[in-house]
Structures are given as structure tokens and as C-alpha cells.
Amino acid sequence: MITSEMQFGVHRLGGLAVVRPRGRLDLSSYAAFRDGLLKLAAEEPAAIIVCLSSELNVATHTMLAVFTTVWMRVSEWPGVPVVLVPETVQHHADMRRSGITQFVPAYASMRVAVESVRRPPAHRRDTVELPLDPTAPRLARRFVRATCRRWDVPLITGDAVLVASELTENAVRHAGSPSVLRLELRPFALAIALRDLDPRPPERPVPGHGVDIVDRVSRTWGWSPSFDGGKVVWAVLAVPRTE
């Protein structure tokens, strides 16, 4: 992938995405590089491992804040771990000065990084493909009810059904494409994401409809472009603790 003044290749290692940036990371390339990593995260790899080699020239250590920004953006959704492997003395020094390792883990080698992110995740996920058809919201509601029942989260089922239904209705009416609905249960949170083929942002909130309802019942929500030219609209609901 090419960004302003930078390139980065993505190597797939099992379900992992290994990124090797090449070029100069500075103010002119910062935003494009950040957005490239966010698009990669939207593809939902098991983790993103970024190798900082001698091919990457960092203008100043403050530019490494790009990884903190990406980590913060993906922590709620899609929850993809982002880790770094600094391969030069200069990158080690820049990371220490920037303080980004308070948030983004760094490992001494690729082997250690891969071992760390391949530990079994503490969450469950399931997906369903939905057609471009008026029946899609009903199919989404049925899928969410069945999945919440299987995962034993009855206290949040109503909100989850509502959010999934509104996101699917938007995809049918405005995106004009089939979609893929994904549920992911994490400790004390349920993530709901709908991928469609329309790159345009979600329609502006209309009181009492669509993403306005999603905004009201969700802890947080947002959208991300995807590499296939479409987008993913997502929401995270708090799962109440049970004694």
C-alpha cells in the first residue's frame, strides 16, 4: 500500500497482518499512514504486528504517536491488538522517548510478538451474511436473538436486536448492498458490526431513526472504511455484570 511519502507491505501470517513500513514518517505522511492502518484493522485480522526496520525513517519521535492513535481507535472496535517490533537501536530510543509503550505493546522479536498475540482471545464471535432484501432486518434480529441466547446475555438482547436491526435497515435503504453482520462478545461488552459495499459514511442521524437510535443505546459507535471499498458501521454495548 502507498501513502504520501510512504509505502507499507502487508504480509499475512496465519490470521495475523504483519506490516513493514518503508519511507519517511512525518507530518505529510502521518494521516495517510494512520488511515491505512485503520483500514487494515477494519479487515479484522487477529492482530496487527508493525515491524520498525531500517527502511522506516521517523522524522521525530513524536510521530510515533500514530500508533497510539490507531490503538485508541481500534480498542473499542474491532478490538484488534496492535503491537510493535522495533528492529533498530534508533527506533528503540524513539519509542522510549515517545512513551507510546504505555499503551502499545512492543516486543524484542517477531517470534515473541507472534507468540503473544496468538494466545486464545477472551471473547466469542459469530457472523451472518444478509441479502439486499427487505427481509434482511428480520433475519438480523433473528440471528441476534439466537446468538444472545446461546451466549447467555439476556439483559442486553433487546438493545442488541434494536441496534442490529437499525444498522441492517440502513444498509438496505442507503447502501444498496448485501451486508455481513458480526457479533463479538468480550468481557462486559458486546460489539455489533455491519459491513456493506458502500464507501459513503452512514446517513446523518434523524431523531428516532437509524443511527440516532444506535447512538442512544450504545456505549460508543462509529464507522471505518474497508479495503474492499466499502465500510463497516459498528457499535459497542455494555454487558451488565451478573453475580
Image (cartoon, grey):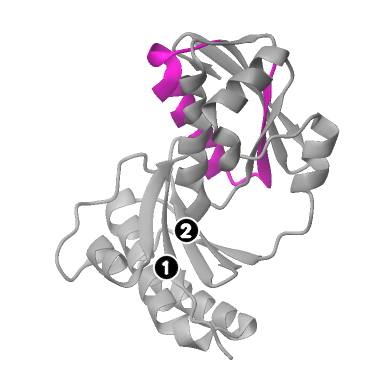
Q: Is residue 33 rendered to the left or right of residue 126?
A: left
Confirm whether residue 58 shows in the render: yes
Q: Is residue 120 rendered to the left or right of residue 21?
A: right
Q: Which mark is residue 193?
A: 2
Quarter occupied by the N terminus: top right
Q: Residue type at mark 1: give it.
A: Ala
Whole-Å distance between the Cαs marked 2 and 1? 15 Å
Q: Residues within 10 Å of mark 1 (few under 14, many from 20)?
A: many
Q: Quadrant of residue 14?
A: top right
Foreground residue among 33 and 133: 33
User: Is residue 167 one of those drawn in magenta?
Assistant: no
Q: Is residue 201 rendered to the left or right of residue 189?
A: left
Q: Is residue 203 rendered to the left or right of residue 112?
A: left
Q: Which mark is residue 168?
A: none
Decide which of tag 2 and tag 1 comes sooner along the chain: 1
Residue 171 image position (x, y, % from top left): 35, 56
| Residue segment shown in magenta | 24-53
Residue 7 image position (x, y, % from top left): 56, 14
Residue 54 image position (x, y, % from top left): 69, 9
Q: Residue type at mark 2: give it.
A: Ala
Identify the residue under disc 1: 136
Quarter occupied by the C terminus: bottom right
Q: Quadrant of residue 184?
A: bottom right
